[in-house]
Structures are given as structure tokens and as C-alpha cells.
Image: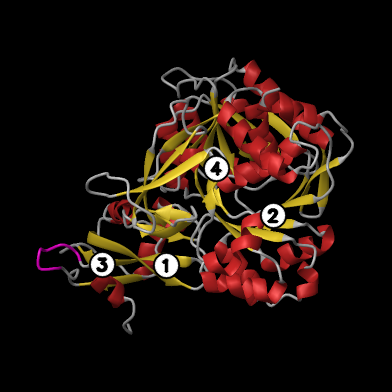
Amino acid sequence: MDLAERIRAVLALDPEAPAVEFEDRWYSWGEFAQLMKGVDGALSAAGLGEDAAIGVMLRNRPSLLGAMMSVIASRRCVITVNAIQGASKLALELGALKPPALVGHADDWAVPGLRDVAREVGCTGIEVVDTPMLGVRVLSELSSIGPGPHHEPLPGVAVQMLTSGTTGPPKRIALRLSALEESLASAARYESQDGPDALRLRSGVVLLPNPLVHVGGIFRAGGALYSGRRISMMERFDVARWHQLVLRHRPKAASLVPAALKMVLEAELPPDDLSSLRMVSAGTAPLDPATAQAFEERYDVPVLTTYGATEFAGGVAGWTLPDYKKYGPAKRGSVGRANTGVELRVIDPESGAVLASDQTGLLEVKTKQHSATRDWVRTTDLARLDADGFLWMAGRADGAINRGGFKLLPAQVEKILEEHPSIAEASVVGVADERLGEVPVAAVVLRSGAPVVGEAELERFADEHLTGYQRPTRYRIVDELPRTPSMKVSQHEVRRLFQEPV
């Protein structure tokens, strides 16, 4: 059976059994099946069948997880939309995507102007809720698809999502249903003793703080549903709440982005409270080897780092427990070895020649999840491969800022800031941050004769026009930007501006 059939089969195993926990309430497999049926019915009534591209405003809510899985299980395509971005940016994205239908939580449909944008696009509006029970309804004022061009159908595609920029500027990438299925089945083979095809509800609970709008959240949630495992969902990561859920469910494995792992370490939780864990996986952003070592020493739990990207339908490389036991501290700092079905190589950025072991260059990846032709795909990550096949990341070739796993390109943020009528020029750079690894900051030059603005106004403008992870954490208003002899803006000197007292 394919992934769509697999999801429906898991839901039917025991409709009364608990499936997803959220804010101390359990929702059953049967409740999820009913919600999914409702979403499917609303889309079918609108004339949207297989391959139709459906916008889903995603954040971590059970109803939105159910909506996403309904679209996938009905062999339609989920177009991911970040529900928590600013209102104006959300409007721009929907105007560009033009989905024939848009699914969102009741709270998100209350965003000012959203219904007006949906009406202009001409899309059917579908609202889902979590309380008092999972529910779905078609918005009466958005109950039909209007005239005009809409997003074209996407045959065989399960999810079309915005990448975080691992292989270049963020772009929409299509994850095929077959590729998503292969990735989830591969993970199930690793975790299940009776094989990935065994249909049964399993013991244990998967903790899900990972955002559904990010590839990590989609794969972690999808993997749990594929294997018939219960999910405890957090709307966002919080150390105290995560600690409570670990004590309640005693999981054997957990997934923490590096920023969250560091927060757990700094909270100094009692080691006995984490004694159920046999491993912690960490991905989406670089992990300081010293932080991993400190976590392992305090909790006696292996930290297995991973590397992946949306473009490759998930994981590309990672540590396994056998590798950890064999190589351990000798390879600390590596993100592991190529996953099954993946090939890696490092090439010279100028000539394209394949480099020998331990030479640093651009990473290229070949994986059958990415394409049927299994072409080499060049990333913008600098890396090296050692003689044992372990991958070591060495930074970015495109200057992207990695903010806790969300990658942003400074030029894109600068362009938006320069749309402010008082800003003549902006320079965005990354500075070190204890919790997130690095965060963006901005130096701006004001336009001559324009109204003078302060940091509060710049923050207001950023809140309106930039997604949360793109927003600078600090601003400096300067007479001119520091430049190199060739008149390029000196990122090093801009960074120094934020080390000086105001």
C-alpha cells in the first residue's frame, strides 16, 4: 500500500485509542479520521480532486495536523503556509500562490484582512478547530472557487513547501508522495523490530515540539502516524513543558534542535528525570560539539546529530547508535555518515572537480528521494568527507544566517527593510547568540529629507513585513555603512558596530 492507503489503514486499527495529545487532552484515532473525512468532503464538494494544490496554514495544532494528513491521504498536495508570519506577508504569499482552497485554524482566519485576500484570490475557505472537539466547516463567504487563475495541480506530489535555504535562496520544492513514503518507511525500518510494514498501534509516545511548517516537523509527525505511534504535540518548545512530558511518557528517543538541547542543558534538569532516553537526535542547525559533550556527560544520553534538507525529502546524513559506539568522541563534531540510498561528494567550487578526503569544498548530494534520475544536487554548504565517510560541515558559501535551524539570506531582509520610506540602505549580518547559534542584526542609513525614525518604528515595520525568524533582533542607525576599498559593504565592520556601546 502507498502512503495514503497506509495512513487510512492506521486510523482504522482502533478508532477509540488515543492518538494525539495537546494541552493535556487526548484526541482519538477515530476523531482524527472524522476530521480528515470532513476536510476531504469539503474539498470534494468544491470540485477539488486528486492532485489539487491545497493551501494549509500550518502551526502545531491537532486540527491542522489532521487537515494536512487529510490532504496527503486523499492524494492531493499540501502547499505549506506559515500561519504565524506577519499579516501583510501572509497576504502577499497567498496572493502569489493562489490556492483554489485554503485550510486554516479558526484563530488564523481571524487575522485582519485574511478573508479579504482569500476572496480576492477566489479560494474556498475551510476552518478547523480543536475545541470543544475536532471540527471542520466551510466558511460561508468563501464557499466556492472564484474565477481567475489558481495554482496548477501537482500530480504525484504530497507536499510543496518553502525550503529554509540549504541549497540556495528559499524556494518552493515538491516532495513527491512516493519519496515521502520511502523516507518514512526507511525511518520505520530503523525503529521497528517487526518491520515497517507491520500494521499495529505501537507503544510509546513521540514528543513533537518541531513545527509542522518545517520539514523536521512534517517528517516526525508523519513518521509517527506511519508507524502507529501516539504523538504528544507542543505548540512551541518550552523547557518546563518538555520536561513534564518526558516524565509523563518516558520516551526512549527525543528530537531537539540545537537551541532546544542547549536550553535543556542550561535548565539543569535532574539526570534521573531523563533516564528513559536512549538517544537524542539533533538537526536543522549546527550543534556546538562542546554542548553535545556537556549534555552527554550530564545525562549519559548519546546525542546523534543529523544533516538534511527539504530538497532531499528529509535526512541526508546522520549518526547511528552503532557508529556512536564504535567512533564516539573520535568523530565528535561530524554530522555522521550518508543515510541509506544517499551518496555524498565534495567538489571544488571553481572547477567542479571532486575533492579527496578531508579537503573542504561544496557538498553535493545524490538521493533517489530527490529525483528519479538521481542527479547530483549541489548545495551551498561547505563541507569535507573524511576517510571513514563521516561528513563535517564547514559553514555556508552564500552567507546565509542560520537562526536556530531557520536559514535566512541577508540580501532578502535588506531588500524588505529598504522598502521603508525612511531607509536609504540596510546591511544585515549574523551575530553569535547563545541560544539560537546566530541571529540577524541590521545597520541602516536613513534617507535624506525623510522623517527620522527610531528602533521602535523599525521593529514595527519588520513585524509587519518579515517572518518572525527573519526579523533583526537589534538595529543601528548610522550615517553611512562601513565599506571595503572596493566599496563593498564590510560585513565584518558592520558586525563590529554591534559590539560597541550605543
Residue denoted by label 1? 473
| Vertical order, 481 against 351 (above or below) | below
Residue denoted by label 4? 314
In the current view of this chain or complex, which residue is farthest to the front?
387
Q: Which amino acid does label 1 sit on?
A: Thr
Residue denoted by label 3? 491
- Whether pointer 2 and pointer 3 mark residues with C-beta atoms closer than 8 Å, the reply is no
Residue 44: image x %, image y %?
A: 64, 17
Residue 34: image x %, image y %?
A: 78, 29
- Is residue 460 left or right of 77 when viewed as pictured? left
Residue denoted by label 2? 234
- Is residue 328 left or right of 474 when viewed as pictured? right
The residues bearing labels 2 and 4 have C-alpha atoms spaced at a distance of 21 Å
Q: How dense is the environment of label 1, judged by Cα within 10 Å: few (below 14), some, or many (20 and up)?
A: few
The one nearer the camera, 1 or 387, is 387
Q: How dense is the environment of label 4, judged by Cα within 10 Å: few (below 14), some, or many (20 and up)?
A: many
Instruction: State the SS at label 4.
Output: strand
Residue 189: image x %, image y %?
A: 70, 39
Instruction: State the SS at label 2.
Output: loop
For the magenta stretch, what is the residue range?
484-489
